[in-house]
Image: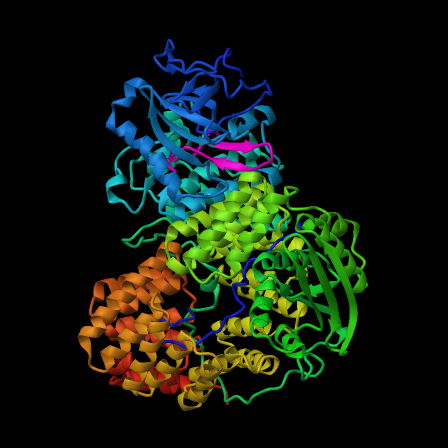
Amino acid sequence: MDDGKALPTDPEDVTMPGVQGPSGSGKFTGTSAQTPPPAASDAATLHDSSPLPDAGSSPTIPPRTSSSGMPMLQLASVLGGRYQILRLLGEGGMGAVYQARDRELDRLIALKVIRPELAGNPSILQRFKQELILARHVTHKNVVRIYDLGEADGIRFITMEYVDGEDLRGHLREREKFSPADAVEVIQQVCRALHAAHTEGVIHRDLKPQNIMRDRQGRIVVMDFGLARSLSDPGMTQTGALVGTLEYMSPEQAMGAELDQRSDLYTVGLIFYELLTGKVPFKAESALASLMKRTQEQAPPVSQVDSSVPKALSIIVSRCLERTPQDRYASVTELLQQLEAWQANPNVRPSELERMAPHRERSLQITLPPVRKVWLWVGASALAFVLLLAIPATRNFVLRRPAPGVVGVTGIPDLSKGKYVAVLPLKILGDEKSLRYVADGLIEALSAKLFQLQEVHVASPSAVEKVAARDLPLNKVARSLGVNLIVQGTVRGTADKLRITLDLEDVSGGRRVWAQEFSGVPQDVLTLEDQIYAGLVQALELKPTNEELARSGVHPTENVEAYDLYLKGRNALRGSKGGREVQTAIAFFENALKRDPGFALAHSGLADAGLRMYADTKDALWAQKAAAAAQKAELLNANLPEVHLALGSVYNMTGKNAEAINELKRALALIPNSDEAYRRLAKAYFDAGRKAESIEAYQKAIAANPYFWDNHNVLGNAYFRLGETEKALQQYQKVTELAPDNSIGWSNTGAVYFREGKWNDAIPAFQKALELQPDATIYSDLGTTYFFLKRYEDAVKMFEKAVEMSPKDEQLAGNLADAYRWSGNTPKAIATYDKAIALAYQQLQVNPRSPEVTGDLALYYAKKGDAKNGLTYIRQARALDSADLQLIYSEAQVYALTGHPAEALRALRESFRKGYPPEEARSDPELEKLRSLPEFAQLAAEFEKKKPN
């Protein structure tokens, strides 16, 4: 592991479940140029290592024209005074592609030139513009990066990423076919690229082996989105138009029908078939005849064509190649899940794989919201469990103590239980301004090095930072973090000379284990980090493996200036209270990269800064920048666990759960004792619908550190969402014992009482939580409790306070609208519902497949009296997640509000059957008219009798 890393903020170190708001939308919340060129593609294929022309001496030379009419750019010429032409890479129907050097940015690029006879064609120019527009929306490491659209010397062109590799068609010519494992790896990466596009409402339409590059590191890059169209733009769908390459069209594309993402999945099946067998499934005399066969016949199974192909993979390919879109996988995510299942067990039986496949009758279409913007990430603060959670009622609860031997009374583990370490920020004795960023950089580097060691458990830096800011005694610090060993110390001196004193305290035994002084100059900070780490490892009596020693000896950069700028950037980011400080951090990171472009950690810093800006502004452009920076860091150094953690959280919060799980597993391979990484993995599993694996991962987080309160808290949240309230309460009670001064344990306890219908018992718990820490979501919880007690004026006061503290939370706004409505203030209610709807659409720009937010929209519309939109969105939400208990109950509310009592009673029955508390329904104002029906009373009584004693 490299030095100097700052692990990303733990997205779940402040999580809580909360209660359902009255709105039903809770807070929880690259042939030389002399040889005939190959066909052009969007990225270059590089096969030789011929010397490049001198970038600084090339004159501008006008282009020649080939026999085919193409403008032939002369080698060594400079187009537009900027792009030095190095060689011709290929020529196709649309134009030619050259390898060039961007002299302004000093990088190799691919330059795509449009034919002159086409340059005046508006539709062709529109395609070129479309490539650029889509590139700005679809940002992913497996999608070719397009830089700019330009015109110079009478030539129109696009500049894009230069990929050092070969397309899949070339690989197939060389290898005939791929091994199953290699084919799966290729298809997985293709699917990840498509997922990035599909999530943006974009389908490819012209996917083929020639448009898929594989670079020398094995990265797959999907190209040529020029034929793609945005699903969200009706004017671009071109129903009835035949667009694409005949050999790889889907049946519905051949018929000129309107397409969705499943058309791309059919093409993926064709490519997968060819990779596994070396043959195409619909062999015919012409491409057109092959296309017609695809509209009339089913492809023979892969295993019949090549018996060496595992039958499980054959089933996956056949599912992709179903003629009817409804019979294929509904999404790339489902295909990825099947591929991951085979990859985990290549001997999996086909029958088992079939059982794991989603039901084919499920809804497949996704209706995109009317507002579309670029998105890629949300900030760490929004990664908290801030979702509305519906929890079934259970029997009465009593407060439980932790099981004997699990957690001591003080919450500090005995040293015999293992080494649980927290590294606190250093205290500055001297010039705070000149020493602080160096001191914090030392601590971050030390923590990052310790994270790699299997013999110790290290508290996450984000948790340490929060606790250290409270200036507590060491025993309380240890209890808050669930550790028994604390590293602390001081740094003194000037900008020219440093003296660092560190000590290691055994808090459980009340003794000092080690103390040592280190001195040097700031320019030797990397050497100081190595010395301090070696001293601490010896004091902890650890025995690192050779692999761990090798990783710890690698520096993130050897450029001292770049590292100094990086540390300054981290310091600015750490102390930021708004956009100005974050912009300062960004400038430091960018300057560090000017001195060392290969400095992966600086890219990681840019990613974290982008995340912070997104959290503050909700501007999706910052989310895009954050993801791009994290992906660049990963390309430069895949051994940075914090990069995988950040990417995992990005993918998770944007609905890319398969990618999230993959990245988080890679992080855990590097930091196997990280409870933080297990927490993030558990959340990704949960959001992917893999609930049992989620619980197991949360339990592994507890096993990694049973003494840190938040590990119990997030497991409680998972149980809470699954309706296992008793188990949830047990975990929350451990939180209150481990961290009695933390408001979260009390707030969550109140949430449990609320779900039991014990609103008067919930109020003291929420008030205790607010006494410890005023918080918008807790105000909302208390307001919701008042709401169910019909204390509407009190509810309005609490919701107004919540919205004042967190004005961009759509769920809090929805709750306030409900309170206005039920207190008789209809104008304010309508205006506030409109605000909640607008905020919800902003959230859907980040994750268009969020069932929770979609369900919220349904309720807001229904309560405004817009039955059409209310019913549309609740059906879409249920299609996105048919098992979510809260959505089932919300469906009942929407049907009741829109005058469909029979459908409301049906949904209500389903919710009760799955554990939703009838007591809440009896007091829910939104079901007031429904409660007047005798069928309601019979239904509620039936399920109240079925409750356990």
Q: Nearer the viewer, residue 345 or 730?
A: 730
Q: Is residue 584 left or right of residue 643?
A: left
Q: Position of residue 418 (x, y in %)?
A: 75, 70
Whole-percent x and y of residue 473?
A: 64, 78
Percent x, y of residue 361: 39, 56
Looking at the image, residue 783 lies above or below residue 375:
below
Magenta stretch in the rendered image: 204-225
Any magenta on residue 214? yes
Q: From this view, report whether residue 222 is shown above or below residue 691.
A: above
Residue 924 in sight from this viewpoint: no
In this view, which residue lies farthest toward the left? 827
Q: Residue at x 62, y 56 (%)?
A: 438
Where residue 840 sits, quadrant-wise, is: bottom left
Image spot of residue 944 (x, y percent): 41, 86
The residue lying toward the viewer, choosing from 571 and 352, is 571
Q: Nearer the viewer, residue 367 or 770?
A: 770
Question: Which residue is nearer to you in this view: 2 or 529?
Answer: 529
Please say if 319 is above or below 913.
above
The chosen color scheme is rainbow
Asked which quadrant contains residue 917, the reply is bottom left
Q: Residue placed at 29% from the left, 83% from the top?
A: 935
